[in-house]
Image (spheres, rainbow, N blue to C red):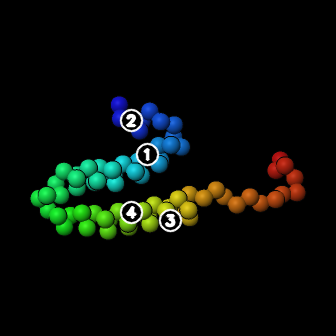
Amino acid sequence: MPFCMCLPPGILFGCLDFLEPVLQFGMIMMFVCAFPLAFCLTALNNAAVIRTDALKLLAMMRRPVLRASATIGA
C-alpha cells in the first residue's frame, strides 16, 4: 500500500501534488551527468508547476463565501 493511501483525505490532496516534483528531482539527480541541460528544463517545469499549484490552492479550492440568512433555513 503506498504511503499516500494511509493518510486522511485532506492530506492526500497535498501529498499527491508533491509526488511528481520529488520523483522528477530524483531522476534528474541520477541522470544529470548524461544530459546536463535537463536540470535547466526541469527547473523551468517546476517553476510552472509551483505557480499552477498555487493558483489551484488559492483560487480554485477556496471555501465558499458565507451568506447571512434571516432564519435557520428550515
Which circle marks residue 3 in the picture?
2
Indicate the quadrant containing the N terminus: top left, top right, bottom left or bottom right: top left
Q: Are marks 1 and 2 in contact (CB under 8 Å)?
A: yes
- Which one is earlier in the sequence, the residue at label 4 or at label 1? 1
- Which one is earlier in the sequence, the residue at label 2 or at label 4? 2
Dot 2 amino acid type: Phe
- Which one is earlier in the sequence, the residue at label 4 or at label 3? 4
Mark 4 is surrounded, within 10 Å at the Cα level, by few (under 14), some (14 to 19) or many (20 or more) other residues, namely some
Q: Is residue 11 left or right of residue 17?
A: right
- Which one is earlier in the sequence, the residue at label 1 or at label 3? 1
Element under disc 1 = helix
Q: Pick out the residue farthest to the right.
A: 70
Element under disc 2 = helix
Residue for badge 4 = 49
Residue for badge 3 = 55
Residue for badge 1 = 15
- Which one is earlier in the sequence, the residue at label 2 or at label 3? 2
Q: CA distance from mark 1 to mark 2?
A: 9 Å
Q: CA distance from mark 2 to mark 3?
A: 26 Å
